[in-house]
Image: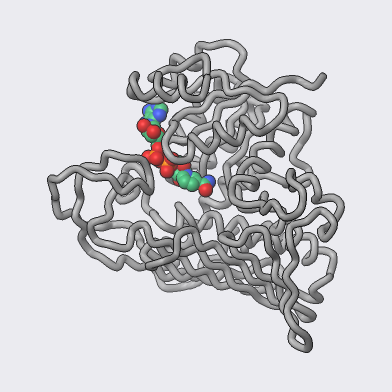
């Protein structure tokens, strides 16, 4: 029998809960511990998920035996110190994005992971949607002809009013960038992943739409929009939106639209690839479809069904056709591929998940975007 993977989850807010639920769906795995700073919340979460051990500090959790992998699901500023602690303790780490606040931190984490020979991952979950995998397959096998150019979009509305405020506006918690680090990293990753090429230059224009926001005490997790009554007017120092142009190794250019202030768009991730024969488009909110765009005939809609996709990708669909795959399935696949490597002593040869090395590259793209916007010029990635 293959080894059972025992996981600990640090931070059980919006995304930490999704980690626990996804791990529960992966055969032969178990969440054995969780960490939340408030003792009552930690106890409640552990009881509701049937998790045996809970702690109020990662230090206490690290004294526990039998943990194979730690999931870091805390606000961004805690990723670096927590990942460092875990790697130095010889534990495998599955960290939420972005890997860190700065490239100084991500570079150190990447080096530490190598030194301690542990498995590491950063959760760029959209690349694990089966239709994104099919898109990658169709591009690399020449089915769309020569890739010419592309568009990528990630737009949301959860910060569209000047009364919306939470830890994402505090640079000590998110670093110098908000929306590019928060959701732009998903697009950087998707673009590099589907084209199979590195981004070699970026040109960015970052925007703050409200110079000040009304800060209220926040009482709920991300997206809950639950607030206290006391209001303070605070300066906004990180971007609400960005337009970014990227150039790939082969010269292909892709435009990226990023916004957290666009009414009606919830989790609007969209990717369009133009090839010399067809285009391909994927929209996260219709995650079980890939649109094949034709000029001479009608467009085709490819459904996420094991019969219609490349046989090597069937493992990413765990339900029969007609049972739509979606966000939670990609999320599960993302963790599952990482666990497979831990179990089988694999080496991420197919680059199926983002390790700390690539996580660091994504941080470099965030910093290059900030620099480009400030200096109003293309920035070359080395
Ligand atoms: N991959 C994705 O699609 C995705 C989506 C949303 C969020 N995220 C990432 O997940 C991370 C968390 O975001 P969220 O939206 O869940 O935030 P959240 O505010 O909803 O939850 C954060 C949790 O961390 C806990 N926490 C804070 N300090 C802690 C500490 N010292 N030890 C243990 N727990 C602590 C908080 O109590 C809270 O429960 C962020 O880095 C964010 O970028 C990723």
The quadrant in which the N terminus is found is: top right
Above or below: residue 350 compared with residue 21: below
Above or below: residue 85 compared with residue 25: above
Is any atom of residue 374 visible in this view?
no
State ligand 1's quadrant. Answer: top left
Residue at 60 percent across and 62 percent down: it is 286
Q: Residue furthest bottom?
A: 296
Is any atom of residue 303 visible in this view?
yes
Residue 44 on image: x %, y %: 40, 22
Residue at 46 percent across and 71 percent down: it is 243
Residue nearer the viewer, 320 or 230: 320
Q: Is residue 339 left or right of residue 162?
A: right
**Colour mapping:** one colour
Above or below: residue 200 compared with residue 300: above
The quadrant in which the C terminus is found is: bottom right
Residue nearer the viewer, 8 or 358: 8
Residue 115 on image: x %, y %: 64, 28
* Number of numbered callouts drawn: 0
Q: Is residue 249 left or right of residue 227?
A: right
Residue 205 position by quadrant:
bottom left
Q: Is residue 53 left or right of residue 200?
A: left
Residue nearer the viewer, 290 or 50: 50
Residue at 78 percent across and 89 percent down: it is 296
Q: Residue furthest front?
A: 322
Residue nearer the viewer, 168 or 50: 50
Residue 260 on image: x %, y %: 39, 61
Residue 81 on image: x %, y %: 44, 30
């Amino acid at each position: 029998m293959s080894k059972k993977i025992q996981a600990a989850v640090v931070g059980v807010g919006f995304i930490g809960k999704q980690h626990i639920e996804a791990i529960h769906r992966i055969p032969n795995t178990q969440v054995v511990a969780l960490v939340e700073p408030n003792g009552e919340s930690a106890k409640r979460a552990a009881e509701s998920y049937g998790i045996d051990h809970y702690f109020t500090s990662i230090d206490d959790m690290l004294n526990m035996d039998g943990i194979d992998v730690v999931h870091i699901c805390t606000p961004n500023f805690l990723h670096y110190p927590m990942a460092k602690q875990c790697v130095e303790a010889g534990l495998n780490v599955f960290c939420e994005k972005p890997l860190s606040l700065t490239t100084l931190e991500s570079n150190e984490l990447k080096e530490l992971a190598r030194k301690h020979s542990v498995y590491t991952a950063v959760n760029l979950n959209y690349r694990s949607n089966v239709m994104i995998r099919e898109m990658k397959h169709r591009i690399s096998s020449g089915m769309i002809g020569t890739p010419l150019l592309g568009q990528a979009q990630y737009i949301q509305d959860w910060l569209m009013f000047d009364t919306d405020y939470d830890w994402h506006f505090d640079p000590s918690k998110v670093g110098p960038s908000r929306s590019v680090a928060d959701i732009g990293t998903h697009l950087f990753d998707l673009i590099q992943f589907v084209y199979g090429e590195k981004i070699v230059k970026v040109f960015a224009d970052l925007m703050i739409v409200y110079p000040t926001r009304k800060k209220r005490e926040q009482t709920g997790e991300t997206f809950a929009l639950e607030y206290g009554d006391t209001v303070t007017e605070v300066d906004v120092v990180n971007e609400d939106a960005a337009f970014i142009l990227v150039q790939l190794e082969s010269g292909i250019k892709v435009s990226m639209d990023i916004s957290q202030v666009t009414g009606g768009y919830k989790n609007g991730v969209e990717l369009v690839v133009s090839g010399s024969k067809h285009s391909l488009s994927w929209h996260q909110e219709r995650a079980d479809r890939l649109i094949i765009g034709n000029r001479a005939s009608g467009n085709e809609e490819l459904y996420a069904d094991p019969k219609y996709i490349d046989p090597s990708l069937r493992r990413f669909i765990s339900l029969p056709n007609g049972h739509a795959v979606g966000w939670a399935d990609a999320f599960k696949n993302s963790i599952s591929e990482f666990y497979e490597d831990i179990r089988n002593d694999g080496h991420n040869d197919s680059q199926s998940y983002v390790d700390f090395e690539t996580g660091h590259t994504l941080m470099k793209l965030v910093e290059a975007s900030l620099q480009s916007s400030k200096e109003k010029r293309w920035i070359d990635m080395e």
